[in-house]
Image: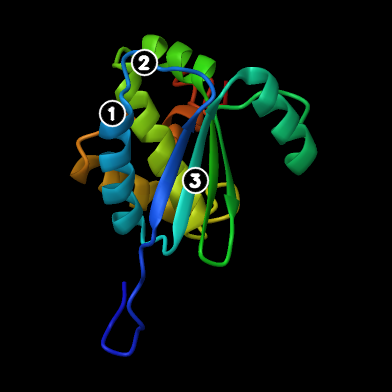
Amino acid sequence: MGGHDSPPIRFWGYVIIFEKPLKTAGRAELERFSRQAQKLARVPGEVSILITGDRTMRSLNRRFRRKNKTTDVLSFPRPEGGDIAISAPLARKNAARYGHALREEMKVLILHGLLHLSGHDHETDRGQMAALELRLRSRLKLPGSLIERSAPKKNARAGRNR
């Protein structure tokens, strides 16, 4: 995480664009959280966050990942910073499903997206991103992470994935 030989990381700022309004997740609170999480995730530069609908998310997922379905969060890294897109409808559904407030779900998605912008990839690493997300989530007092929720559960009797 940076020693004496490491250049300082510059944080230029962030932009949050609400295409879909979030009545219970205010701009100021999400901006404060984003700034704090960006520093903890060590993402230099400017980060833009788009809060949008499922149609846009499906289109982005199809275009950039060749997956013709909506998803809750996508990250697009740049040399300095990057962009994050979040589905407001899926965030609402997941907040209700997991029993926490929408603003908390938005923070979980923002943190997850920032970790991808910092170069982590839970689909190819050996648990490093999950471990880091767990530590940061605890530090930021957030509910369950995306990686935990999407990991296959072991069936206790059959010993296989569900």
State the SS at label 2: helix
Q: Which residue is pictured at 71% across the width and 34% down the height? A: 61
Residue 132 in the image: state x and y as whole percent: 35, 52
Whether the residues at callouts 1 and 3 have beta carbons within 8 Å, the answer is: no
* Figure quadrant of the C terminus: top right
Reading the image, the residue beneath label 1 is 143
Look at discs 2 and 3 and give the one toward the viewer.
3
Query: Compared to 43, does 149 lie above or below?
Result: above
Quadrant of the rendered image containing residue 33: top left
Q: Identify which residue is drawn at 59% across, 19% down.
A: 53
The type of residue carrying mark 2 is Tyr
Inter-mark Cα distance, 2 to 3: 26 Å
Of marks 2 and 3, which one's residue comes earlier in the chain?
3
Residue at label 2?
98
Residue at the extreme bottom: 5
Using the image, determine if residue 91 lies above or below residue 34: above
Residue at position x 44%, y 21% in the image: 156
Tell me which amino acid carries mark 3: Ser
**Residue 75 appearing in the image:** yes
Left or right of 116: which side holds 67? Answer: right
Q: Nearer the viewer, mark 1 or mark 3?
A: 3
The disc labelled 1 sits on which kind of residue?
Pro
Circles 1, 2 touching at the beta carbon (< 8 Å)? yes
Q: Tell me where residue 56 sits by quadrant.
A: top right
Instruction: Compare residues 53 and 125 and report the one nearer the observer.
Output: 53
42 relative to 136 in the view: left or right: right
Q: Is residue 83 above or below residue 20?
A: below
Residue receiving disc 3:
48
